[in-house]
Image (spheres, rainbow, N blue to C red):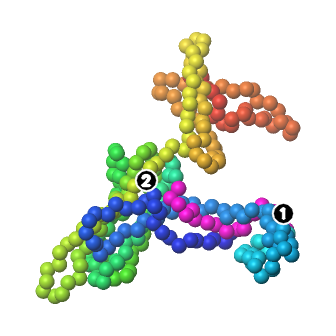
């Protein structure tokens, strides 16, 4: 499939909190989510199909896309689906879910008319419990960033905690000054905040059974606004307990093979 990218920009959800005072170097951060399919409505019509001769033809807007002009030319069955074959990057920050890999494009740009030398950049992901260093070049800082230039890189991290997260970015540098004048070392921090939500909600019911057994029923609910593919669900008991999956008996399919119980592997209830 062809890929069409939009111009990167700082999303409002990740707007930085800047301290007072101008700095030669500034951070710009953009989340790198997975692209989505561009879907156009398969039912299209031209304005002249409805208006006819009531409106002058010159006042009717010209179709803006090839799919609009060829709305009736279905050369293949997939043409009716409305998918154009393009990939689009989301234009908002979106929702970050637990368990996914957070990827961010970080750009450090020099917006002044002076050269920034010995540039040391550090990026950390902070939560209420810990902080993780994602990028740090203090051992080998950049020699210089020229006016109007930038230094770009990508950071990634697997999200394992819920709640508020802060992408803490800081840069230390020395401005280019005339010979004989001591250069002051400057530091500029910026923080980008976002929340991590739980993609699923699990509800459980416990019922006592015979011979010391306990029946546990678990219901996994999709807490997002998009479909989720649940490949497997497992129950891990405490070390002193064992569990057995409880479900209806398998029935024979049309070809003689076994048909798994509704809910798939690991679904339904369990006995411990």
Q: Position of residue 216 (x, y in %)?
A: 58, 24
Instruction: Count neighbours of disc 2 (C-alpha within 10 A) and say few if under 14, some if 14 to 19, many if 20 or more.
Output: some
Task: Please state the horizontal and vertical placement of residue 7, each as a whole percent of the image.
Answer: 53, 73
**Where does the image place residue 259, in percent across and percent down from the top left?**
77, 35
Outermost bottom residue = 179
Magenta stretch: residue 36 in it?
no
Outermost residue, top side: 211
- Picture quadrant of residue 128: top left
**Residue 62 appears at what percent x and percent y?**
75, 78
Residue that badge 1 annotates: 77
Nearer to us in this view, 67 or 185: 67
**52 or 178, which is in the foreground?**
52
Q: Identify the residue at image location x=32%, y=73%.
A: 25
> Which image quarter is the N terminus in?
bottom right
* Left/right of residue 219 with respect to residue 184 in the rendered view: right
Name the residue located 38 percent from the left edge and 80 percent from the top edge.
149
What's the magenta region? 74-94
Residue named by callout 2? 194
Determine whether the residue tagged by mark 2 lies in a helix, strand or loop: strand
**Quarter the C terminus occupies:** top right
The residue lying at 27 percent from left, 72 percent from top is 22
Q: Is residue 71 visible?
A: no
**Residue 246, visible in the rendered structure:** yes
């Amino acid at each position: 499939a062809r890929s069409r990218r939009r111009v990167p920009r700082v999303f409002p959800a990740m707007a930085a909190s800047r301290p007072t005072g101008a700095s030669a170097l500034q951070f710009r951060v953009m989340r790198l989510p997975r692209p989505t399919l561009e879907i156009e409505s398969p039912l299209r019509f031209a304005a002249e199909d409805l208006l006819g001769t009531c409106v002058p033809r010159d006042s009717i807007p010209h179709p803006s896309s090839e799919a609009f002009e060829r709305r009736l030319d279905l050369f293949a069955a997939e043409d009716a689906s409305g998918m154009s074959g393009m990939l689009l990057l989301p234009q908002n920050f979106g929702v970050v879910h637990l368990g996914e890999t957070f990827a961010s494009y970080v750009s450090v740009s020099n917006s002044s008319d002076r050269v920034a030398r010995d540039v040391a950049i550090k990026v950390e992901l902070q939560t209420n419990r810990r902080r993780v260093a994602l990028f740090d070049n203090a051992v080998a800082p950049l020699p210089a960033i020229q006016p109007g230039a930038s230094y770009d890189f990508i950071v990634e991290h697997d999200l394992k905690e819920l709640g508020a997260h802060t992408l803490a970015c800081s840069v230390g540098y020395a401005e280019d000054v005339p010979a004989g004048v001591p250069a002051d070392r400057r530091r500029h921090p910026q923080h980008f905040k976002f929340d991590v939500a739980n993609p699923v909600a699990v509800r459980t019911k416990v019922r006592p059974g015979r011979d010391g057994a306990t029946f546990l029923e678990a219901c996994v609910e999709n807490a997002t606004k998009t479909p989720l593919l649940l490949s497997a669900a497992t129950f891990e008991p405490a070390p002193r307990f064992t569990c057995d999956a409880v479900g209806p008996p398998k029935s024979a399919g049309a070809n003689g093979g076994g048909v798994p119980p509704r809910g798939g592997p690991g679904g339904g209830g369990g006995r411990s």
